[in-house]
Image: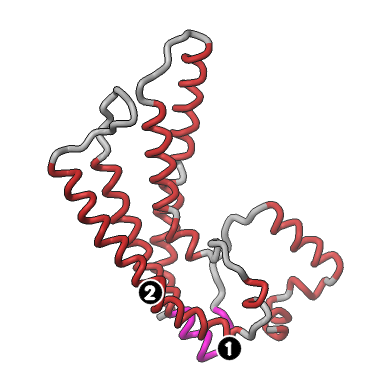
């Protein structure tokens, strides 16, 4: 199970970080549109299509990466008070009740949606540029498959936690500045707070 978790985390991270570059393409595209629209009075016919395709692609393809890092929004005001075994048990049930049915429905409906779009090489109706969007709709399928792969890894994490009583360590990753500052503040007040052994003992 540990080897599968490692594989899924690496796969999700690779796709998430590669498709994160979509934000740069979107930024340059919108920046170019602003310049030519307001300085040269020559707006592009493709900037809007570029913006929603890049944002949508980044949003979809980063879903599995965010899941692997525990970055999705959750109402944890009750959850965080539970012991790790209780957390893992509840999560395990919820994965099978809601996560996998929802993601599998996404893959199946996305397949129908994308295949129909590929059959007639669908173009965007949002602008006069007729930008092809059939390849964009294929992202729905890819994102769903990645979520299934990562979802299985999350199930394995839950099983390990139920057995051991401790959540498996996750790889070090980029953190929001707010999170870093909070940790630094806690460490300054309590030097033992940064000790992993002390955290596990508290759990």
Q: Residue furthest bottom?
A: 163
Magenta residue check for 162: yes
Q: Position of residue 153 (x, y in %)?
A: 41, 73
Please give the label number shown on residue 165: 1
Tell me if mark 1 has few (under 14), some (14-19) or many (20+) residues whose alpha carbon lies within 10 angstroms of its own. some
Q: Which residue is mark 2?
A: 152
Please give the label number shown on residue 48: none
Q: Position of residue 80 (x, y in %)?
A: 65, 76
Q: Secondary structure at mark 1?
A: loop
> Residue at coordinates 25% horizontally, 42% vertically from top-left?
135
Q: Residue furthest front?
A: 125
> Residue at coordinates 48% horizontally, 15% vertically from top-left?
37
Tell me, yes or no, whether the two marked residues, 1 and 2, touch with CB atoms within 8 Å. no
Q: Quadrant of the N terminus?
A: bottom left
Q: If you read the primary sequence from the N terminus, does the residue marked by circle 1 or circle 2 appear first?
A: 2
> Residue at coordinates 46% horizontally, 45% vertically from top-left?
20
Q: Is residue 177 above or below residue 160?
A: above
Q: Residue furthest left?
A: 119
Q: Is residue 30 above or below residue 42?
A: below
Indicate left or right for 80 with 183 as reference: left
Q: Residue furthest top?
A: 40
- Residues drawn in magenta: 156-167
Indicate left or right for 70 with 33 as reference: right
């Amino acid at each position: 199970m540990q080897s599968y978790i490692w594989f899924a985390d690496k796969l999700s991270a690779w796709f998430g970080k590669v498709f994160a570059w979509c934000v740069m393409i979107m930024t340059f595209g919108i920046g170019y549109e602003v310049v030519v629209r307001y300085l040269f009075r020559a707006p592009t016919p493709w900037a809007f299509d570029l913006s929603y395709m890049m944002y949508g692609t980044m949003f979809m393809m980063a879903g599995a990466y965010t899941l692997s890092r525990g970055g999705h929004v959750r109402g944890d005001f009750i959850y965080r008070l539970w012991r790790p075994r209780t957390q893992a048990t509840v999560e395990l049930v919820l994965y099978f009740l809601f996560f996998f049915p929802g993601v599998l429905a996404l893959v199946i409906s996305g397949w129908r949606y994308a295949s129909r779009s590929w059959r007639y090489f669908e173009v965007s109706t949002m602008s006069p540029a007729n930008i092809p969007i059939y390849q964009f709709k294929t992202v729905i399928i890819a994102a769903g498959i990645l979520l299934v792969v990562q979802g299985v890894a999350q199930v394995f994490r839950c099983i390990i936690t139920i057995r051991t009583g401790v959540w498996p360590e996750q790889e070090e990753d980029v953190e929001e500045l707010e999170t870093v500052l909070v940790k630094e503040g806690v460490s300054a007040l309590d030097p033992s707070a940064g000790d992993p052994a002390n955290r596990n003992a508290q759990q």
